[in-house]
Amino acid sequence: MGFEKKEIVLIIGILFLMIGMLPFIAPIYAVGIAIAIYFGIRVFVGRKRRMIQKVVGEGICAVCGEKIVKNKCPNCDKSNQP
Ligand SMILES: [Zn+2]
């Protein structure tokens, strides 16, 4: 569910990158580079997720991806306190 949102952000980011490249290179190259970056990131994220799943026993924090220890995120619980 959180992944879907990230995917939309990724696509929007790459679209802006593609538009940013348009003045400098031919549109077909901009589209090609954008698609290459998209799939590159997809592969990278997929590998990272698999690595996280291997490491994680209790689950991961939805906010920062840190490993959950005793139902608490060591990162976010720390930062929530002033
Ligand atoms: Zn966290």
Image (spheres, grey):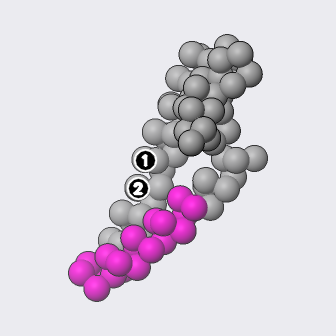
- Are there few (<14), some (14-19), or many (20+) residues within 10 Å of tag 1? few
Q: Residue at x 47, y 55 (%)?
A: 38
Residue 19 image position (x, y, % from top left): 40, 79
Is residue 21 inside the magenta stretch? yes
Tags 2 and 1 touching, CB below 8 Å: yes
Specify the quadrant of the image occupied by residue 63.
top right
Q: Label 2 sits on what residue type?
A: Ala
Q: Residue at x 60, y 38 (%)?
A: 81
Specify the quadrant of the image occupied by residue 57.
top right
Q: Is residue 64 visible?
A: no
Q: Which sits in the foreground, 20 or 72?
A: 72
Dot 1: what SS? helix
Residue that label 2 marks: 36
Q: Is residue 46 left or right of residue 69?
A: left
Residue that label 1 marks: 40
Residue 39 image position (x, y, % from top left): 48, 50
Quick one: which residue is furthest to the bottom in this view?
A: 23
Q: Is residue 13 visible?
A: yes
Q: Residue at x 67, y 56 (%)?
A: 5
Q: Is mark 2 within 8 Å of ligand 1?
A: no
Q: Is residue 71 left or right of residue 38?
A: right
> Gap in Å between the C-alphas at discs 2 and 1?
6 Å
Q: Which residues are magenta?
A: 9-27
